[in-house]
Image: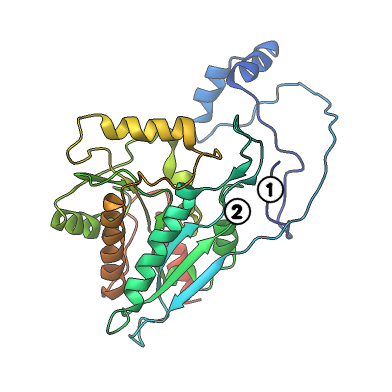
């Protein structure tokens, strides 16, 4: 089952389909072309689509359903009249897969305790800490618990299309998705490291914690493009996504990566993603504090963060800022 947001007046593809690499290679070979050569040519700016001359027919039964989800937003208004119309947005997705295919034990409930109830817990704790400050930060802080992430980042896509703050007024997005449940780490993973001026803020705060900041440690999984900060980045918002490190305190080298690989292979998107008393929240607290202090620094700074020059999202940011004056 696939979901998408209701169509507006934008153009939509009538049918989406995927083929395997091997099938695509065979189809292209049948037409006298080579897939690798076409792919290489496509990297050039002057590439033009190449008609393959293949036609096919597809017959399938399709049932359409309309379901309703929701984003849950909470606002902490800023204390500075000149900056309160700008915002730092904390995001976590509140959905999971619901009731689905039973596992070998007959359990059909996909709880999503780590993915992403843990992220929601982190963001709610950060919200409580900000709310408890004697004075609110200069900029507003928006807590956005978005829905339908598991169906294609749809909740954050909807928010990005209908933001409650102008994109050029959104200072930054800090996202949590599947928090650390294994304990203290010497490091922390910053998905998006090297892309924006958020780097300098987070690196300084992590150093105060005595921790090393590392870029995506599972880069083959493409995490920056698979969680909700991606949709905010597409409208120009500098974004960071914090995940657990892999260098765990008092654990042998490689232990942390083994835990995360096992979780991905056995627990991820399964009914077994349930709370377990063995969870160690120490690292989750460290990561929550890191995001709290980073967001607070951004909310109180004179200037908003920016994408680094040449970053893929820099143009969208400049357009969003320029649109404020239009």
Say which of 65 and 226 sits in front: 65
Q: Residue at x 76, y 21 (%)?
A: 54
What residue sits 29% from the left and 70% below the top?
296
Q: How is the image coloured?
A: rainbow
Q: Disc 1 on helix, strand or loop?
A: loop
Q: Nearer the viewer, residue 253 or 92?
A: 253
Q: Is residue 21 left or right of residue 12?
A: left
Q: Which mark is residue 148?
A: 2
Q: Give left or right: position of 60 versus 169.
A: right
Is residue 207 left or right of 230 when viewed as pictured? left
The answer to whether residue 86 is seen in the rendering is yes
* Label 1 or label 2, whichever comes before in sequence order: 1
Q: Position of residue 288 (x, y in %)?
A: 31, 59
Residue 316 can be seen in this image: no
Q: Which quadrant is the N terminus positioned in?
A: top right
Residue assigned mark 1: 3
């Amino acid at each position: 089952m696939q979901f998408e947001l209701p169509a507006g007046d934008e153009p939509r593809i009538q049918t989406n389909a995927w083929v395997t690499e091997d099938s695509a290679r065979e189809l292209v070979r049948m037409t006298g072309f080579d897939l690798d050569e076409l792919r290489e040519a496509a990297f050039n700016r002057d590439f033009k689509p190449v008609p393959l001359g293949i036609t096919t027919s597809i017959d399938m039964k399709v049932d359409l359903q309309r379901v309703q989800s929701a984003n849950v937003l909470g606002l902490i208004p800023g204390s500075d009249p000149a900056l309160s119309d700008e915002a730092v947005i904390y995001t976590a997705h509140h959905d999971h897969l619901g009731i689905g295919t039973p596992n070998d034990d007959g359990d059909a409930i996909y709880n999503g305790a780590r993915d992403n109830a843990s992220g929601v817990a982190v963001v709610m704790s950060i919200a409580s800490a900000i709310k408890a400050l004697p004075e609110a930060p200069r900029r507003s802080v928006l807590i956005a618990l978005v829905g339908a992430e598991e169906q294609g980042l749809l909740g954050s896509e909807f928010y990005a299309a209908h933001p409650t703050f102008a994109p050029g007024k959104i200072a930054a997005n800090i996202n949590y998705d599947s928090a650390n449940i294994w304990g203290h780490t010497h490091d922390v993973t910053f998905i998006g490291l090297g892309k924006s001026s958020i780097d300098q803020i987070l690196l300084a705060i992590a150093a105060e914690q005595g921790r090393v900041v590392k870029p995506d440690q599972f880069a083959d999984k493409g995490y920056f493009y698979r969680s909700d900060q991606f949709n905010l980045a597409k409208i120009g918002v500098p974004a960071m996504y914090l995940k657990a490190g892999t260098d765990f305190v008092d654990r042998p080298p490689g232990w942390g990566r083994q835990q995360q690989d096992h979780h991905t292979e056995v627990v991820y998107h399964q009914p077994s993603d349930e709370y377990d008393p063995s969870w160690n929240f120490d690292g989750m607290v460290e990561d929550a504090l890191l995001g709290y202090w980073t967001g607070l620094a951004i909310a109180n700074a004179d200037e908003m963060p920016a994408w680094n020059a040449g970053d893929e999202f820099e143009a969208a940011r400049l357009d969003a800022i320029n649109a404020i004056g239009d």
